[in-house]
Amino acid sequence: MALEKRQLPEADREILYQLSGFIDIDKINPDAWPALVADLSTGEPGIIALAFGCTRLFQPNKPVTKAQAAVAIATGEASDLVSEELARIEAESVAENAVAAHNALVAEVEKDVNANFEKELSMEREKIDALEKMAEEAKCELERLRAEREEENMVLMKDRAAISAETEILSRLRREVEEQLESMINDKVEISYEKERISKLRKETEDETQEIVRLQHELEVERKALSMARAWAEDEAKRAREQAKALEEAREQWERRGVKVVVDNDLHEQSVAGDTWVNVGKQVAVEGTISRGETLVGKLKTLASEVEGKSREFIDKIVQRIQYLISVLRKWASEAGAKAEELKDGAVLKARGSVQEMQQTTAGFSSAVKEGAKRVAGDCREGVEKLTQRFRT
């Protein structure tokens, strides 16, 4: 029987058709062809012959066919054996299926494990490759960084040496700057002291300049006063000299005329005397001198009001000298007038004596004027020398 055989023969459509003669072989699963060939090879007692008879059609889709196969398997002498064999085959099939399923599961698990392992291994290999690549890159990067670090270290060493040199230079420069700063501070102190001294000198110079301007103004005023006094003195001295000369000429003229005084003839005496004193009054212009002196005194007082101190005292001294000279002139004029009145009223002396006395009076007046003018001129020179000396100092 075909079920007892563990090894089924190889079968194809032609072999199965030659053995069975069935025309619908294509409707049977090709996996059942080896079992059908083995069953048909046994002859009449086979399952196929019992189930299908002489129909030569499998008709696997009809229920009657399945019933025939079941009846054929379940009846007859081989039913028990078929049942046992089917049970054994079913058990073996179950066992084989279980083993196959287990093996398939193990194979699938192994496959999955191997796939996972291969996958993980490939991933690990990729990781390892990536890590090796990264390690190589890191190594190259480290080499590059090492080279750069060495270069940087060389540069840093050079920079450190340069910084050390620059630090030393800066220290030296700092010492020099500190020395220069100290020197500048000292110079600044000296400059401030010099500025203060210069400001004091400038102030003193300004004060001295103002003092010089004031002294120059006072000197100009004093010079003007001195020049006015000197001009007045020289003018009056010149007038006195001219007057003395005129008196001398009058005296000579009287001597040439031989003027005689007649006591009995009062009219003639009076006329001669009056005529003589009129001429003398015309020649001796004392009032004009006094008037000019007073005018000069007024001008000098005006100049004295413009200055102060020693200049005013100096001009006041000149004014006092001129006023003293004017008082002397007034005294001489009053005395000369009194004597003239005495000559007019008395008329007992000789004309020559009168002329000599008048000449003496006029000479005294002239000498007084000259002496006053000389004194004023001397005072003027002395004042000029004092002013010059004061201006120089």
Image (spheres, rainbow, N blue to C red):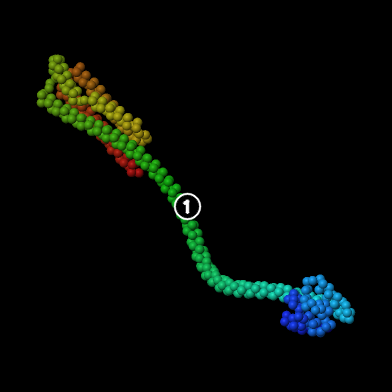
Whether residue 340 is visible here, answered yes or no, is yes
Residue plotted at (58% across, 74% down): 140
- On the image, the x and y values in percent for residue 351 come to 15, 22
Which residue is disc 1 drawn over?
A: 189
Give the quadrant of residue 51. bottom right
- On the image, the x and y values in percent for residue 57 come to 77, 76
Quadrant for the C terminus in the image? top left
Q: Nearer the viewer, residue 384 or 38?
A: 38
Q: Amino acid at mark 1?
A: Val
In the picture shown, does residue 354 fall above or below 38?
A: above
- On the image, the x and y values in percent for residue 215 come to 34, 39
Residue plotted at (78% across, 80% down): 36
Q: Nearer the viewer, residue 343 or 374?
A: 374
In the picture shown, does residue 193 fall above or below 275?
A: below
Q: Report the side of 383 relative to 2 (left or right).
A: left
Q: Report the side of 289 relative to 350 (left or right).
A: right
Give the quadrant of residue 270. top left
Q: Report the side of 353 relative to 207 (left or right).
A: left
Q: Nearer the viewer, residue 387 or 83?
A: 83
Dot 1: few (<14), some (14–19), or many (≥20) neighbours within 10 Å? few
Q: Which element carries disc 1, helix, strand or loop?
A: helix
